[in-house]
Image (cartoon, coloured by chain):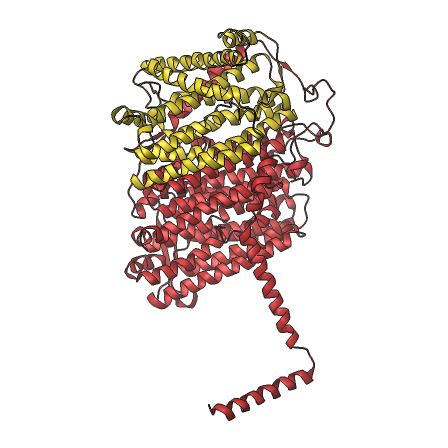
Chain colours: A red, B yellow
């Protein structure tokens, strides 16, 4: 299978879908699903077939390269799977909205461009696909209009800033080494001076950090994620943002190499240590801000920022375990955050767009499958054992403790508690408690929504119980980056300083649960009652008022909310405002009256004459 | 078969010791209050009785949550060394324990949430906030211990202590140990951190809707929880023990000490509790960790 064919399917399929929509909606839906599923199949067949194509007749005589290695296969596979699930979910989600043809075109185009990014072997191709992705994302974020427009604007402004940084970085590499190909650069850069490497690192850190929503470049993400259509939020938070992580991996581990990356600077002021601390801040602040949110999608969006910190820490530490954990966390995050956004999408679809956590409740009785999806997704995000999130976090914590970074480990572990608090609020306020009367007639989510939810839940559990499956691929990636190989079996990791055996944990939990369930059954059978038969101190249950959700963590909110403002965002807003003021100040000079302009010219000439008379410069 | 036997012994002894502690606490509390008090075996009698009583259920998650919660506690027990016995110590160590300890409160919270009773929801909200409060010092303590001994395996930590003496004898861990002692009442739900149940305010919080066998299960879970909190303290700071009898004796002494605190203190409000937990215990644990990093 050729890589060109894959790109042709991806991009051609997007256009074909758009053309098919002119025939009928049904054809369009079928083609969109077939295209996205065929991409999954094609890429799956390419496993372990590293190839590389060079086109010398390319753009401006630069050679263009398409290549596939384990790292890009790993990302391409994730993109294709999440993309296809989001398209399937969209079938009913987007049906009653307007401009659906445009929606499908853009969502497939963004997927295609992401596949293009991971397949490109030189920075020119990389940049072109990167820009297609950025602009496609902008159009999809603003799809809903209304508050989505400023959200999209914020995104695209920051994204352009990142692109400019990337362009400067590319051009400085080119001006020194006259090549854009990743492979050649990786051979040359190790001989560069430390100052130049740091310069390149900082430029690419800005470029990829903005896309990856790394603190302090995260401010575009919360509004963008919450305003985008839910299936696209799943792609956006799941994999599109993580293209920034792919960029980090390419620049730090592939182009620069581990040795250069870890030896830039000394001790506490080395590049990777500072990067690790940025990761730690990135975990703590957003996770606690998430706890204060009342909008379900915004809550998840802040977790999207927070979880990125674990990946950054893992890669920044640079040990085999850390990098493996960081890369593993990327796909784990993809699976559970995509799942949670799809769950919110299903709720939105059935409740006609309600995202406010304070006005839902008790939906578990009406949407049980969606609840199970939400529960598994939440467990994955928290990192409960037997979900995949646990394994990747375990790898990261272990390397932090054994390599003597206990304070980083503390930040990472504490982030888990922020996650539990906010996700329990998410589960409780949507699914538990009293069911409001207006939702009594609500129906289950349609099958096209349940299917992606069930698939992602299965992925989370399988990768959690048998983490060896993805870790085997990840092990190849870290070996190709020049790190030590890990001793991986199907059910975990063996090493001399404490091991992990997920199958043992699984066996212990399931056997215990079965025994306790049998004991439970052995007791006298319980009587089933509804939510109106509750303890209310002898009074009747007050309708609609017997529900505790608003200000769920009020005592803590009162204590910490004033420290948890998004200071970075405030700073950017002030910056934007002062530039606006400066602009309007400058505009006042151009009054539009010809007399003023003549006055300016005369004053300028007078100034020149004055200078010449006094100092005789010319 | 050895391992199955060990597992049975651990679970049974934890059950008996945990329930015995609950019975003992009622008796001692009664004596401090100048009452006669129930017999020490009262919790055992209650549990047998509760299994045969009628109960109401609010749905599938209401039942499953309780089962998950108890499962979580039991599995944590299997990872904790008890004397020389530690059947699952090879499968993950202290990091796994930190995460397994989440299952039990989460299961109870889901179950109580499905009960659709605001008292239960308030209780859960307080439970998570209190956990947030004591996790800050607790994680610092765990990290200090793991950094000091440079291992994540709790069985190994106990073994090293058998050779070099209790953790309490080394300076950084002395601070961490004191911090653990300061937060232990919060972990096992003793006064002044009893706001989760607070019978006079929120009708026993998460317990509001439980009766019959549900109440029996939550009582057992509470007994395990007390056992785990004290057993961790004993393993990490009081040197564990070579044989189970000595181990239980150490646990009993710790328990009775905290029972005296429980008997004479009133209840904190939740903000006061968090403020306390994030101040002195966290500070001590933090200093302990810094010293452990520098000297280790």
Relative horizontal placement of residue A331, taking residue B127 as reference (left or right)? left
Say if residue A59 shows up in the picture. Answer: yes
Relative horizontal placement of residue B78, taking residue A568 as reference (left or right)? left
The one of A500 and A89 positioned closer to us in this rendering = A500
Looking at the image, the residue that sits furthest to the front is: B34
Q: Position of residue A447 (x, y in %)?
A: 60, 33
Q: Position of residue B90 (x, y in %)?
A: 33, 26
The residue at 62%/23% (across/down) is: B115
The one of A71 and B220 positioned closer to us in this rendering = B220
Above or below residue A12? Residue B187 is above
Q: Position of residue A334 (x, y in %)?
A: 48, 41
Q: Quadrant of residue A603?
A: bottom right
How many marks the image carries: the answer is: 0
Say if residue A19 shows up in the picture. Answer: no
Q: Quadrant of residue A505?
A: top left
Relative horizontal placement of residue A468, taking residue A131 as reference (left or right)? left
The one of A455 and A7 positioned closer to us in this rendering = A455
Q: Position of residue A190 (x, y in %)?
A: 29, 58
Above or below residue A115? Residue A131 is below
The one of B187 and A373 positioned closer to us in this rendering = B187
């Amino acid at each position: 299978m050729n890589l060109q064919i894959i790109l042709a399917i991806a991009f051609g399929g997007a256009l074909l879908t758009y053309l098919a929509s002119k025939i009928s909606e049904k054809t369009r839906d079928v083609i969109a699903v077939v295209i996205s599923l065929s991409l999954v199949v094609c890429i799956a067949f390419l496993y372990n077939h590293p190839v590389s194509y060079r086109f010398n007749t390319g753009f401006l005589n630069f050679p263009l390269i398409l290549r596939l290695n384990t790292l890009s296969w790993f990302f391409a596979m994730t993109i294709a799977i999440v993309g296809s699930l989001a398209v399937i979910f969209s079938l009913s989600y987007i049906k009653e909205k307007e401009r659906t043809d445009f929606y499908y075109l853009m969502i497939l185009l963004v997927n295609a461009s992401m596949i293009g990014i991971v397949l490109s072997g030189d920075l020119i191709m990389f940049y072109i696909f990167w820009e297609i992705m950025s602009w496609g994302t902008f159009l999809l974020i603003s799809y809903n209009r209304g508050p989505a427009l400023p959200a999209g604007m914020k995104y695209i402004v920051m994204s352009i800033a990142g692109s400019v940084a990337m362009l400067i970085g590319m051009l400085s590499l080119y001006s020194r080494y006259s090549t854009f190909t990743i492979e050649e650069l990786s051979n040359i850069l190790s001989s560069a001076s430390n100052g130049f490497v740091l310069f390149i690192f900082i430029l690419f850190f800005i470029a990829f950090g903005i896309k990856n929503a790394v603190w302090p470049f995260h401010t575009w993400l919360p509004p963008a994620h919450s305003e985008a259509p839910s299936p696209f939020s799943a792609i956006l938070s799941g994999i599109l943002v993580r293209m920034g992580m792919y960029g980090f991996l390419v620049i730090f581990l592939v182009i620069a190499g581990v040795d250069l990356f870890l030896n830039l600077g000394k001790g506490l002021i080395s590049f990777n240590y500072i990067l690790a601390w940025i990761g730690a801040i990135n975990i703590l602040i957003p996770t606690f801000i998430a706890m204060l949110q009342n909008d379900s999608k915004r809550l998840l969006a802040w977790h999207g920022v927070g979880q990125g910190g674990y990946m950054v820490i893992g890669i920044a530490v640079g040990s085999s375990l850390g990098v493996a954990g960081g890369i593993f966390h990327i796909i784990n995050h993809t699976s559970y955050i995509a799942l949670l956004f799809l769950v919110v999408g299903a709720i939105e679809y059935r409740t006609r767009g309600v995202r406010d956590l304070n006005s839902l409740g008790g939906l578990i009785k009406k949407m049980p499958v969606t609840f199970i999806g939400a529960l598994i997704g939440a467990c994955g995000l928290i990192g409960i054992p037997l979900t995949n999130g646990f394994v990747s976090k375990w790898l990261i914590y272990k390397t932090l403790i054994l390599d003597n970074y206990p304070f980083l480990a503390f930040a990472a572990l504490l982030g888990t508690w922020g996650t539990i608090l906010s996700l329990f609020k998410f589960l409780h306020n949507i699914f538990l408690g009293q069911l409001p009367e207006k939702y009594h007639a609500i129906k289950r989510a349609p099958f096209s929504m349940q299917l992606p939810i069930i698939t992602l839940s299965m992925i989370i559990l399988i990768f959690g119980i048998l983490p060896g499956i993805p870790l085997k691929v990840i092990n190849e990636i870290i070996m190709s980056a020049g790190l030590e190989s890990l001793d991986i079996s199907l059910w975990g990791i063996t090493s001399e300083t404490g091991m992990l055996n997920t199958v043992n944990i699984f066996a212990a939990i399931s056997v215990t649960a079965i025994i306790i369930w049998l004991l439970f059954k052995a007791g006298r059978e319980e009587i089933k009652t509804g939510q109106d038969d509750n303890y209310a101190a002898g009074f009747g249950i007050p309708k609609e008022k017997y529900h505790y959700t608003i200000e769920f963590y009020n005592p803590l909110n009162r204590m910490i909310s004033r420290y948890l403002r998004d200071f970075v965002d405030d700073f950017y807003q002030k910056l934007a405002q002062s530039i606006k003021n400066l602009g309007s100040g400058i505009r006042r000079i151009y009054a539009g009256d010809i007399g003023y302009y003549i006055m300016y010219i005369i004053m300028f000439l007078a100034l020149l004459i004055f200078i010449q008379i006094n100092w005789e410069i010319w | 078969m050895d391992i199955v036997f060990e597992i049975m012994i651990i679970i049974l002894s934890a059950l008996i010791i945990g329930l015995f502690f609950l019975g003992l606490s009622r008796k001692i509390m009664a004596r401090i209050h100048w009452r006669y008090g129930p017999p020490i075996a009262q919790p055992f009698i209650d549990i047998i009785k509760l299994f045969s009583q009628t109960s109401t259920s609010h749905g599938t998650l209401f039942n499953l949550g309780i089962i998950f919660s108890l499962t979580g506690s039991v599995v944590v027990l299997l990872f904790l060394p008890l004397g020389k016995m530690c059947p699952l110590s090879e499968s993950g160590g202290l990091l796994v324990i930190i995460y397994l300890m989440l299952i039990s409160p989460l299961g109870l919270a889901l179950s109580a949430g499905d009960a659709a009773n605001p008292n239960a929801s308030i209780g859960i909200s307080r439970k998570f906030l209190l956990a947030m409060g004591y996790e800050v010092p607790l994680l610092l303590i765990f990290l200090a211990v793991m950094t000091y001994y440079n291992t994540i395996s709790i069985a190994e930590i106990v073994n090293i202590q058998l050779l070099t003496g209790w953790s309490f004898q080394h300076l950084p861990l002395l601070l961490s140990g004191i911090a653990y002692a300061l937060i232990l009442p919060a972990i096992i739900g003793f006064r002044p951190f009893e706001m989760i149940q607070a019978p006079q305010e929120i009708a026993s919080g998460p317990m509001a809707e439980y009766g019959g066998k549900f109440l029996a299960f939550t009582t057992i879970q509470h007994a395990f929880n007390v056992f785990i909190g004290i057993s961790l303290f004993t393993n990490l700071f009081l040197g564990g023990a070579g044989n189970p009898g000595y181990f239980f004796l150490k646990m009993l002494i710790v328990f009775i000490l905290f029972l005296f605190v429980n008997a004479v203190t009133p209840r904190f409000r939740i903000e006061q509790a968090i403020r306390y937990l994030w101040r002195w215990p966290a500070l001590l644990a933090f200093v302990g960790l810094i010293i452990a990093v520098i000297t280790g």
